Amino acid sequence: PPGLDALLGGLGGAAEGGAADCSPSSRSGARHASSSFSSSPSSGPQPLEQPLEHPARAAADADCADSSAGRARLSVFYGGLVLATVCEIAGAACMKEADGFRSLYWTMWAFILTVANVCVTICILDLSDLSIAWALYTAFEYLGVLAIGIFWFGDKLNTVQTSALCLTVLGVGVLIVEEEELLQYQDGDEWHQKLWSDNNDPSGKYGTWDTSKASDGGSGGAGDAAGSQA
């Protein structure tokens, strides 16, 4: 009957539609829809994000790098200071040997060494504090010239020279110790800044600091702090 034919035709169309939905393309689209749904913020747990770095910790790391560069510059400064002092002492000895420009050979050597001394001094004066650099340079130069005069030319020390020698040695020692203490203070301040930046984070978003390494002076704490950020 016509009504039965219409009913059977409707059921066949529904079956064909269901078969079309089971095609590979429809399954692929379903997978894409499922994946896009699962990646949405409201679909459930998301992949863990990488821990953020505390801004103060980043600044402390930059300061630590600057401190290492400062120590390298200080090593270059001391090397240049020794070279400049040697050139100055040798030039002064050549001038004394020339006896008032009477010997052209020694006068030329004195001129060459003096020029080398000036060039090296200009290069090293920006690598450290000028007051410390110039004080150390003049002190070493004075001690060297005095030693050459005593051991090579047989000069005698008077009371004024002896007093100046003692004061110079004392001043050089004080300057070197103060500069080393300043560098150690800067290193300690940077380490405490790192410790503060890691502990001053109640949310735990920026990681934690292993305070058990505090007795090590912070040398091993930085590595543990980086490893504990998970």
Image (cartoon, rainbow, N blue to C red):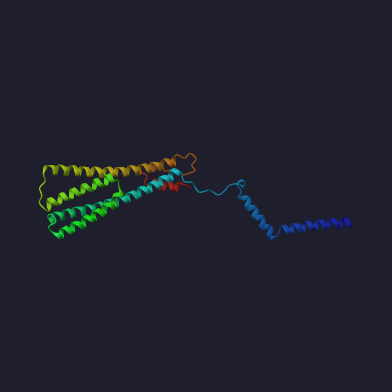
Q: Quadrant of the N terminus?
A: bottom right
Task: Give the image quarter of residue 7.
Answer: bottom right
Whether residue 208 can be seen here: no
Q: Is residue 114 left or right of residue 67?
A: left
Q: Is residue 31 left or right of residue 163?
A: right
Task: Give the image quarter of residue 117.
Answer: bottom left
Q: Is residue 208 above or below residue 12?
A: above
Q: Residue at x 35, y 42 (%)?
A: 188
Percent across and percent down for residue 164 are 16, 43
Percent across and percent down for residue 214 are 37, 42
Q: Is residue 159 above or below residue 108?
A: above
Q: Is residue 18 above or below residue 158?
A: below
Closer-to-camera residue (157/221): 157
Q: Residue at x 44, y 48 (%)?
A: 227
Closer-to-camera residue (106/7): 106
Percent across and percent down for residue 49 are 52, 48
Task: Give the image quarter of residue 115.
Answer: bottom left
Closer-to-camera residue (169/156): 156
Q: Is residue 169 left or right of residue 1?
A: left
Percent across and percent down for residue 20 are 73, 59
Whether residue 32 can be seen here: yes
Q: Number of numbered discs present?
A: 0
